[in-house]
Structures are given as C-alpha cells and as structure tokens.
Image: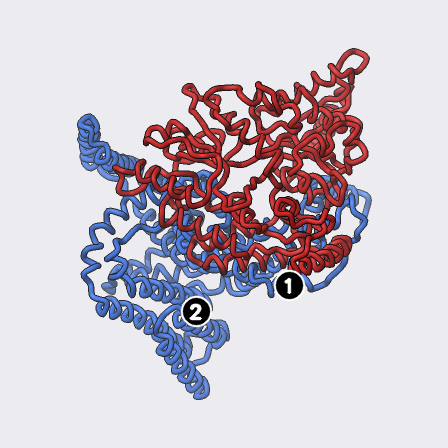
C-alpha cells in the first residue's frame, strides 16, 4: 500500500512538473499576450492579422517571428472582472460598455500618455464615445469596433406586402401609421397576428433612451449625480412601447417571444425571423451582416433611425478594450492599441462587417465601406453618418455600478406585466438608481468627493435653468446634455 | 508512544494528507473567509490588489441592511413560495413509489396482445400520415410510445418502470429546463395546445354561469379552506388532550395553522370570517390549555405529524384561496374567452411554472427511491393482519403504510426544505434570468448577482450566511427529531 501511495505521489509530481513546463509562457520563445474577448470566429483571424501587422511594422525577433504572440482567452464581462481583481486578468480585456467600472476598480491602465503618439486617442474615433472611454479627462480605453443600433428593414418583406421603403427619419406618429399599415397587410389572412412589424422592444433600453432624449430628457441629470429617468418624455415613450406591443400588436409580446423557435445560429431567433419575413424590422447594427452575408439568397436591407419627436439622436456603443494594469507586456499592449487604430485592422473590420471600424477615417469616403454590395442599401453610410454626427454614448453614470441589475429593463418588465403603471415603474427605477448611487458614494470616499463636487455644479446648472440663463459647458458631464444644449443654443462655451 | 506507533500515525496521516489539504484549501478556508467577509464592506470595486483601500469591519451592518432590503425579503418570499410545491412533490414520490412497488410483469398472452395492438397502431399512424393527417398521427404516435412502454414494462417488470421514473434525476438539468421551456411555449407548446382546446370548449359553458353562482362557489371554496384549518385546529387539540401530541408539537402545529388562516384571510374576501375563526380557535385553545389534560406525553411527541399535516393544510388552504379568487371572476373571463397561461413569460405564472417543473423532477428523484426502500421494509404481517380485519385499501395506507414511512417522509421533507432554500438558481438562469420583473429570482440567484455581477462580496456573503442559518435551523430540527418517530 505504501509503495502504491509513493507511486501515486510520484506520478502526480511528474504530472505537475510537466504541466508547469508545458505552460505557453515557458514553451514559447516570445512573450505571450492574452486578449480577453468573446469567442467570435473572427477573433482568430484578427489575431493572425495582428501577427502579420507586427511583421510588417518590424516588431519581430531575430528570426523574423512576431515579437509577441497574441492568444484569445474568451470570457464574459463578469468573469473578466473576477479574473482582473484576482491578478490574472488578460493583458487586454474587452469590457464593452463598462469601462467606467473597470477604471473604478483600478484595473484599467491610463492610456492618455501614449494614446496621441499611438494615434488611438479620441481624435481617432467617434466623438460620441468620449463618455465611454474618457473619465475626468483621462482616456482608459480604445475600441475594437463601434456600433450604432438602429432599425434595419427587410425590403423584400416590405415589398411582399406592397410597402415602400420607410424614410430614414420619422416621428412616432409617422412610424405608428406605417407600422400599423404593415401589420394590417401582413396579417390580412390571420385572425391572430403572426407577422410582426419588428422584434420585441420589451428590453430595448437604447430605443427608450433615444425617444426620451428626443424630447430633451436623459436617464441621468447633467452631472450624472442623480437619475431622472422618471420624466414625462420617458413615461410617454414607455406608454407608447406598451401600446405598440399589447394594443396595436406591432411588436411581439413576451409570450410571443417565448413561443418562437430559439434556434437559428448567430443572432438567434430574431435574425432567423427577420430573414424569413416574420419580422419586417430588427434593431441591430452593421455586425448583422456577418450573418446575412452567409445567405445563399441575399436579402435587401435598409436602415432607419428610431422614431423621435424633436431632437434627432442615436446611441453609439463600442466593444471597448482596456489594457490590464497588471499586464507584464505593456509595450506590446500599446502595439495592440496602435493596431486597432491602424489601417490593416480597420480595413479588416470594414470588409468583414464586424461593426463600425474603430477609426472612422478609414471609412469616410471609402467606396469599399460605403457601397460594398447592392443589397446592403444605406446601412453603411447611414450608420457611419449617425455615429459621427448625431450619436451619444449610452447613459452611464460614473456613480452607479451597471454590472448589477438593469433597473430600466426590470421596471419595463413590471409595467408590461401589469405590476405598475408607467409612472410608478419609472419612479421605482429612479429610486433604485439613486439608491445605488448613494450606496456607491457611501462606500467610496474618492467617489464621494467627486460626487459632492459634481452636485455643487448641478446646483449651479439648476439655477441657470430656473433663471433661463445659458449653462456653462464646463459644468456638464453628461455628453447628451452637452450636445443637446449646444444644439438648442443654451450653452455657454 | 513508541517509534512504531509514531511511524504508523505518520503513514496514516500521509495517506490522509492530500484529502485534508484539499478540504482545507477548497472548503474550510474559503468557508471561514466567507464568514469573515460577511462582517466586512468588501466590494471588488473598492478593495482589490490594485487599490489601496483596506477592507473595513462593519460588523452586523450587512445583516441589518439585508433585513431592511426589500429585494432580500422579496427574493426570500419567492424562494418560500416555490417551496409550496414540496408537499405535492412528496405526495407524488410516495404515489410513484407505491405504484412501482407492484410487479407489472405480465404473462405471455398479455405481451402478445400488446404487441398486436402496437403493430396495429404503427400501421394506423403510417396510414394517417400518408393521408396528410399529421396532427392526429402525432397524437397516435404518443399513444404508440405509451404502448411500447407498457409492452416493455410487461416484459421487463418493475425494473423498467423504475428506470423510466428515475430519468429526470439523471438527465442534465439545463437540457430538462430547455425542454420544459419548449413545453411551456405559450403559443405553440404542447401544454398550451392541449389546454387551449379544453378552455375553448368549456368557455361557453362557464360564460353562461351567473356571477352569483361563481361567487357562491368561490365563497364555498374559501369556507372549505377555513373549515379545513378549523378542523385541523380542533383535531390537534383533541390529540393533545388524548396524550397523542406533546405541548411543543401542539404549539408548532397551531402556529403553522394560524399562518394558514392569516394568509388565507389576506388573499381572500372573507377576511372577517377567517379572522373570527382564528380568534375562536385561540380562545378555545386557551380554555383547553388552562383546563389541562389527563393524559400526558413528552413535549415534542407527534412533531413530525404536526409539521407534515399542518404544512400540507397550509398549502392546500392557500391553493383553495387562490382558486376561489380565480372562480370569482371566471364568468367575466370566460365571456372574453379563456386563454391558457403564458407560463414563464407572465409574472403571475412564472413561479407556478417552475414549481410544476419541480414537481415533475421530484417524482423521478431520490425521494421515490427512498420510499421504495421504505416500502420494502414494511412488514407484510401488518398488511395481512389488516386484511383479516377487513381493512379497506385507504385504511391499509393510512394506518400502516403512512405511519411506517413517517421517518422517511420526515427526512425527505427536511431535505426538500433545505434543497428548496438553496435552489432555484439553475432554473432561473436557464429559463427566466430571474424574471419577469424578478418573479423567479430566488436567494441563490440573488447571491450570484450581488457577488459576481456587482462585486459586493461582503453583502453577498451576508446573504449566504443568512441562508446557511436557515438551512442550519432546519438541519437542527432534523437532527433533533428526524429519526425518532417511526411508528408514531
């Protein structure tokens, strides 16, 4: 027995040593850099492209190998967070829209000193993204790709029911009229609606936000210190969402969604239903073309903005990426950021249609980007135009941890399930966001000091608004209000 | 201790060391750390290797915050609500075990008969499909599958059925959740397809029912619920007076029944009568207690009976109250056309949908195996004696089987309560994401959100330890009373 035990110990020890020696960092003669991202097949091509780019730029070893080997480590944002605080985060981490949280945790490197020289500063991307990538004047992230979610129409489906392509911009009234007409025609033979105008909007927070912003209201105030989601514009928009879903039956209810077949590959059931004509519209972005280009019979698509009342606006989002503070390969992470803003990568994104290229200068005036295929209509030009001209980043307060529950979607669920009126639902969301802010500043002295300073600014802003005076631009943190007040001539620059 | 003994101890420890080290590294130490964390403000955003902030002890602040947190209370309520399915799960397991305790092995004539019927069925299905009648063919296909199961059962006996019944337990959780999601599909799921036809046919009949009739039926159901609780009160007191129930058991039983009455009154229109029954019950109890009793017994005698019976009465009375509310509005709803529930897509039905699925899982679980083992241990002599006395099947069950299985029932109940308190995470994650609007968020899912989504480790640990305290209480209860009342 003792000998067996000794043998087991020996085998385990040998296995441990072998495991240790087989680590990539020991096996490879170049440093290994890990990129925490999703498992999209395109990532592997992008990694190869990075290696080629390194060779092209002369970042090679003596025997001509790339100076660093990039490897993919796919995980979601939550596991990335746990890994990052445990000291085992990847060298580069895709954090999507929660850059602020990773910065606040102290795991994101400040890129400001190197961004301008590496040409991956804010002048080399979409201005609307500053709220996602920059905090207190310091840049903490760049992006792998951008996106403006908008309404995509299947022109073939519209044509089938004798509908013309919709306008690029519309009001809720014109939108409703058009959508009702479509649903009427598409369900002429069905007593129960089976063809819907668009995908479910029960959790489309950006859509709700755009409609609210079009009446001059954001989910947070000018300094992001308090939520004011309980405002007349959001209430009106939420009531319209309910009417369009449950009364006019333009969009599927939760039960309709639960009844849909969920299979369908990349993009899920929604993309499948859009392709086969069950849905005339989906809310998506340019990345949807990855799926649509695989089709044997290409569909004709067309993009429009969300319906809006007055101030036209869209939301630009990004798969933003940070450099991990604990990375041991800082010089190579800098190269990766440069690669993201450089021609090779941007042209790859343009050709592969994986969203908007991080550096828009490669898309502007580029026929490869603007008119690649006849069936893709205005989707490229419109999305680029909106990203550059009318878009703001999502409403994210630096004082609220958005990795937890999404209270906007939660209260939308409550309202749609008859558990609250629109007003009550928004009151609850506002209360929950503000409680979250109170908890965050109570726990974090640094954040509290910043919040108190911003609250002081907010008081001045409120006073200016009360007295009908122009608001000093330097006091406003919320990018939307900056743009809105500027457009309305209410800003003191 | 001589050198040889020391060497033997060292060898023994050497063998144990890998396991002990593993236990210390992955169980004991994390457990202690999580206990300490529950008293701190550890928040990943603030406290990690890249921040200079130190974790502060805030002692009981997390626990105080927790009990003032409406979300915690709500998610605890969700957890408790879903545990209402436990008595049904236990009853289902017992029923399944009693069925599976019989031998179904048939004679050769029976097997050939079923074989012949199966062949006829298959030919019929093929003919129907060729004729384009796919819906009918599908129904017949299901019947054919049942026929095949019967056939195999006749050939293989109870082993086949026991294996089939145990399927839910060894099928991977997520795949069964996805399967149930499909079954619950509101528009085209098989459950609603079947329900829709039934509801369509009964709607005209129910629409003709007058409001007065509906209200009368609803009130009768409530009265039955209240009477049931009242009867249970009386029965328990009588048991106590006869010395069949200890004072502690009586107190527990009356507490559970009082909760049943209070909740029934809250959920129904007969608040005043329910509370009146409660008041009368209390007065009678007080009078009886003051008078005292002739026959005495130990304090906790009859406790398992108190918990199981009173708990079941609680659940049944709540179901009756719920049904009464449904029947109250039934004519109006039937006029508009009765529609099947939207199950997990609807706030009000999401929890029952998960409970129903849990019921299915409970029938095909270890509980059935435990009951089967218990049934094989019941002395046949008792049944023979009962037969000689001319006992009916129900009397055989109620006077022999049920008491003989009481220790197993009690064990299953306790384990189910522990499982219920800890459960709900996988179902919520795979089927509903805790929605709609938090309807299916249980405590375990809440711990996950707090700990791994928002990074509030201190608070998440406090919730975990509170949950542990509840489970520990139930375990203590089991440890104290679990194995003492066989043949009670």
| Residue B453 point in image, percent of width and height | 62, 47
> How has the structure been colored for display?
by chain
Q: CA distance from mark 1 to mark 2?
A: 34 Å
Q: Nearer the viewer, residue B215 or B470?
A: B215
Q: Colour of chain B?
A: blue
Name which residue lies at 45% across and 59% down: A421
Which of the 4 image quadrants contains residue B307?
bottom left
Chain letter of mark 2 equals B
Which of the 4 image quadrants contains residue A384?
top right
Chain letter of mark 1 equals B
Name which residue lies at 42% across and 41% down: A175
Badge 1 local density, few (<14 within 10 Å), some, or many (20+)? few
**Which circle marks residue A442 in the picture?**
none
Q: Nearer the viewer, residue A120 or B171?
A: A120
**Which circle marks residue B65 in the picture?**
1
**Which circle marks residue B306 in the picture?**
2
| Residue B51 point in image, percent of width and height | 78, 47
Q: Are marks 1 and 2 in contact (CB under 8 Å)?
A: no
- Chain whose colour in the figure is red: A
| Residue A4 point in image, percent of width and height | 68, 31
Q: Does the image show residue B453? A: no
**Which quadrant is home to the C terminus of chain B?**
bottom left
The answer to whether A225 appears left or right of A309 in the picture is right
Badge 2 local density, few (<14 within 10 Å), some, or many (20+)? many
Name which residue lies at 38% across and 56% down: B88
């Amino acid at each position: 027995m003792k000998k067996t035990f000794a043998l087991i110990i020996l085998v385990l020890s040998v296995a441990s040593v072998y495991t240790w020696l087989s680590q990539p960092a020991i096996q490879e003669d170049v440093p290994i850099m890990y990129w925490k991202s999703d498992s999209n097949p395109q990532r592997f091509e992008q990694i190869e492209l990075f290696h080629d780019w390194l060779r092209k730029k002369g970042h090679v070893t003596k025997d001509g190998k790339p100076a660093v080997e990039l490897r993919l480590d796919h995980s979601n944002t939550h596991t990335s967070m746990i890994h990052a605080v445990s000291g085992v985060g990847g060298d580069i981490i895709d954090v999507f829209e929660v850059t602020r949280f990773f910065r606040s945790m102290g795991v994101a490197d400040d890129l400001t000193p190197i961004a301008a020289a590496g040409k991956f500063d804010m002048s080399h991307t979409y201005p609307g993204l500053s709220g996602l990538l920059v905090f207190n004047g310091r840049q903490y992230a760049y992006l792998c790709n951008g996106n403006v979610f908008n309404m995509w129409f299947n022109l073939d489906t519209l044509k089938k029911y004798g509908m013309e392509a919709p306008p690029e911009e519309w009001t809720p009234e014109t939108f409703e009229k058009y959508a009702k007409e479509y649903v009427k025609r598409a369900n002429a033979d069905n007593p129960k609606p089976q063809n819907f105008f668009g995908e479910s909007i029960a959790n489309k927070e950006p859509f709700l936000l755009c409609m609210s912003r079009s009446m001059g209201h954001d989910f947070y105030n000018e300094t992001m210190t308090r939520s004011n989601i309980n405002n007349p514009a959001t209430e009106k928009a939420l009531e319209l969402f309910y009417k369009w879903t449950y009364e006019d039956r333009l969009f599927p209810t939760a039960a309709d969604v639960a009844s849909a077949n969920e299979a369908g590959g990349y993009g899920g059931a929604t993309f499948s239903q859009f392709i086969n004509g069950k849905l005339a519209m989906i809310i998506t972005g340019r990345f949807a073309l990855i799926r649509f280009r695989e089709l044997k019979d290409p569909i004709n698509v067309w993009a429009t903005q969300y319906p809006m009342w007055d101030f036209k606006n869209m939301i630009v989002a990004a798969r933003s990426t940070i450099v991990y503070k604990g990375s041991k390969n800082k010089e190579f992470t800098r190269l990766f950021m440069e690669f993201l803003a450089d021609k090779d990568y941007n042209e790859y994104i343009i050709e592969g249609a994986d969203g908007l290229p991080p550096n828009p200068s490669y898309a502007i005036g580029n026929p490869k980007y603007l008119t690649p295929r006849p069936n893709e209509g205005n989707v490229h030009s419109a999305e680029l135009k909106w990203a550059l001209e009318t878009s703001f980043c999502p409403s994210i307060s630096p004082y609220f941890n958005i990795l937890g529950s999404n209270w906007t979607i939660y209260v939308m669920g409550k309202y749609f399930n008859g558990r609250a009126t629109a007003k009550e639902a928004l009151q609850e969301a506002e209360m929950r966001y503000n409680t979250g802010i109170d908890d965050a500043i109570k726990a974090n002295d640094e954040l509290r000091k910043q919040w108190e300073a911003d609250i002081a600014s907010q008081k001045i802003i409120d006073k200016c608004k009360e007295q009908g005076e122009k608001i000093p631009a330097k006091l406003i943190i919320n990018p939307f209000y900056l743009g809105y007040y500027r457009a309305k001539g209410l800003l003191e620059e | 201790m001589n050198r040889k003994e020391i060497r033997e101890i060292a060898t023994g420890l050497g063998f144990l060391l890998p396991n002990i080290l593993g236990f210390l590294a992955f169980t004991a130490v994390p457990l202690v750390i999580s206990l300490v964390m529950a008293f701190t403000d550890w928040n990943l955003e603030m406290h990690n290797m890249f921040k200079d902030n130190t974790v502060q002890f805030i002692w009981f602040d997390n626990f105080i915050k927790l009990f003032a947190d409406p979300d915690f209370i709500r998610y605890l309520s969700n957890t408790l609500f879903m545990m209402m399915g436990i008595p049904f799960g236990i009853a289902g397991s017992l029923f399944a075990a009693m069925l599976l305790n019989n031998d179904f092995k048939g004679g050769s004539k029976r097997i050939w008969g079923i074989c012949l019927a199966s062949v006829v069925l298959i030919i019929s299905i093929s003919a129907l499909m060729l004729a384009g009648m796919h819906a009918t063919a599908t129904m017949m296909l299901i019947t054919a599958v049942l026929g095949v199961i019967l056939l195999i059962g006749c050939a293989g006996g109870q082993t086949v059925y026991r294996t089939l019944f145990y399927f839910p337990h060894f099928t991977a959780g997520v795949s069964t959740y996805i399967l149930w999601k499909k079954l619950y599909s509101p528009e085209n799921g098989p459950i609603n397809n079947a329900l829709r036809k039934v509801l369509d046919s009964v709607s005209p009949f129910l629409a003709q029912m007058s409001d007065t009739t509906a209200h009368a039926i609803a009130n009768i159901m409530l009265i039955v619920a209240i009477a049931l609780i009242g009867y249970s009160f009386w029965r328990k007191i009588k048991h106590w007076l006869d010395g069949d129930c200890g004072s502690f058991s009586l107190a527990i039983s009356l507490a559970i029944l009082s909760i049943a009455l209070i909740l029934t009154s809250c959920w129904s229109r007969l608040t005043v009568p329910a509370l009146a029954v409660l008041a009368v019950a209390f007065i009678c109890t007080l009078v009886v207690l003051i008078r005292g009793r002739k026959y005495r017994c130990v304090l906790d005698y009859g406790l398992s009976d108190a918990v199981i019976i009173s708990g079941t009465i609680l659940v049944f009375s709540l179901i009756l109250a719920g049904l009464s509310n449904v029947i109250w509005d039934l004519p109006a709803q039937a006029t508009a056309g009765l529609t099947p529930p939207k199950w997990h897509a609807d706030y009000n039905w999401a929890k029952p949908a998960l409970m129903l699925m849990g019921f299915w899982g409970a029938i095909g679980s270890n509980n059935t195996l435990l009951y089967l083992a218990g049934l094989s241990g019941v002395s046949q002599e008792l049944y023979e004696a009962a037969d000689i006395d001319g006992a009916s099947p129900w009397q055989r069950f109620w006077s022999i089987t049920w008491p003989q299985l009481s220790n197993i029932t009690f064990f299953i109940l306790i384990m189910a309560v522990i499982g219920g308190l800890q459960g709900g995470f996988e179902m919520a994650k795979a089927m509903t994401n805790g929605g709609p609007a938090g309807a299916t968020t249980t405590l375990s899912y809440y711990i996950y959100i707090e700990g791994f989504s928002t990074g509030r480790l201190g608070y998440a640990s406090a919730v975990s330890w509170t949950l542990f305290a509840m489970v520990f209480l139930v375990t203590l209860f089991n440890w104290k009373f679990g194995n003492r009342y066989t043949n009670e």
